[in-house]
Image (tube, grey):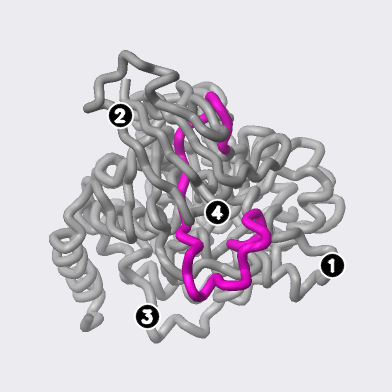
Amino acid sequence: MPVTLIKNAAAIVTAGNRDEVLYNADILVKDGIIANIGQNLSCVKDRPETPDADMTVINASGCWIYPGLVNTHHHLYQTFTRNLPFVQKMELFPWLLSLYEIWRGLDDETVYYSALTGMGELVKYGCTTVMDHHYVFPRERQNHFIERQFEAAAALGLRFHASRGSMCCGKKDGGLPPDDLTQDVDVILEDCERLVKQFHDPSPFSFRQIVLAPCSPFSVTGTLLKQTAILARKLGVRMHTHLCETIDEERYCMEKVGMRPLAYMESNGWLGEDVWFAHGIHFNDEELALLAKTKTGVAHCPVSNMKLSSGICRIPEMLKLGIPAGLAVDGSASNDNSNLLAEIRAAYLLHRLSRSADAPSGYELLKMATRGSAALLGRTDIGFLAPGMAADMFALDVELLELCGALLDPQNMPATVGYSRPAKWVMAAGKIISKEGKLTGIDEAGILIKARNCVASLLKKSGIDS
């Protein structure tokens, strides 16, 4: 049984039930699980029979340790379509229509290397669990997109919740996406069931789970929504989609089905503790009350919402009402990075600007990115640091010139001050997966060459010179 002792951490922000911060303390990890947290812990005392080869001691002096961050909404394939000049002033619908022309060129290799790139960046900044919403499946091409994403997550050593996303309502049927990026409902449902049976592991400390995730009200039919809800509950997996992201979406639902987006989702069986929506910006008071009553969750994506000029999610009210809420970076092309640590600060500043004293504290937003996000994914084994929890955590070196005078409050610092460099190290299941800003599971230099070739190939297919 591998044993790791993390010694002398300047501060440990547990984000636990009592919101403890432990100073000059240690963490003992056994077989990927936290065995103890406290002062003056010893590997030898707790497990004298452990051979020296199975014991690792990490000196965390000068570091603050936090629970691993949990990202609850992403589109990893978009990593290779960032910083494109011609979409920078667009809002969601025209932005999507422009980028669909590039995304139709996705293939297995592009999906694999974009996943490595996007998840690799997330890892460097403290993220240990990633949920991705992949919904682009070119109709006329065989693919193994979800399989390749799981391969990338395994290479990096993080926990991965893949979604089998979908689009079935193209332009000819009144939807937004091109028809060649849609699939038949039967094909979608069959593949959803296949992937759940192949990959979904609901056991504690799981590294692989599947979510069923039709893309949005403007790209799928009510039939697919209803059948997905039935299948997901039959198979015991969670459900996810975009909702209430823009006024254009609200207008589309009113014109198409005569209902506001949430009422439409309710009519198709999409409310409950096993459902969470991405964005959730334009809910009214009655809808917030319904979300609270049904414990339907929301993934907050502040940077994406700002970049696409979509609006500001009502997070202060959601937290007060007890609506499950987590944090997410959203697709890389609408962010344009995969840094959940930076997202915490962006969320803090956005809500301070819009709500002043009613805004959540920096620590509340840190907990959204840890405990709150874990709850959206249905996880009780990650999200805070305590004995019996997964040994998922990251350390920030705080003995830095740029943090001088900013060390009074470890709980709030990531939001109020921010941290603009990679974590000192990042651990998932007791294993270091990033150290000093370098990923330990992959050859970054070699991956970068292949990833750049994928970017060039993808853009060339759509006539863009990279």
The residue tagged with tag 3: helix, strand or loop?
Answer: loop
Question: Is any atom of residue 346 visible in this view?
Answer: no
Residue 357 has which mark?
1
What secondary structure is marked by label 2? strand
Discs 2/4, front: 2
Q: Earlier in the sequence, mark 4 or mark 1?
A: 4
Comparing 292 with 319, the one in front is 319
Query: In the picture shown, does residue 432 fall above or below 329?
Result: above
User: 316 or 86, which lies in front?
Assistant: 316
Tell me the amino acid under the disc marked 2: Met
In the picture shown, does residue 452 fall above or below 279?
Answer: below
Q: Which residues are magenta?
A: 385-414
Q: Earlier in the sequence, mark 1 or mark 2?
A: 2
In the rendered view, tell whether residue 85 sits above or below residue 257.
below
Disc 1 to disc 3, how far (Cα)? 37 Å
Point 58% across, 31% down: residue: 386
The answer to whether residue 446 is left or right of residue 231 is: left
Provide residue 130's location: percent of width, then percent of height: 44, 47
State how far apart marks 4 and 1 are (Cα): 34 Å
Tell me the residue that label 2 is attached to: 55
Please tell me whether mark 1 sits on a helix, a strand or a loop. Answer: helix
Q: Name the residue that disc number 4 marks.
A: 216
For label 4, the SS is: loop
Disc 2 crowd rating (10 Å Cα; few below 14, some 14-19, many 20+) is: some
User: What is the distance, in whole Å, between disc 4 and disc 3 at their CAs?
Assistant: 24 Å
**Could you tell which of marks 2 and 4 lies nearer the N-terminus?**
2
Mark 3 neighbour density, 10 Å: few (under 14) some (14–19) many (20 or more): few
Q: Nearer the viewer, mark 4 or mark 1?
A: 1
Quarter of the rendering occupied by the N terminus: top left
Circle nearer the N terminus (1, 3): 3
Q: Are marks 1 and 3 in contact (CB under 8 Å)?
A: no
Q: Which residue was labeled with disc 3?
A: 84
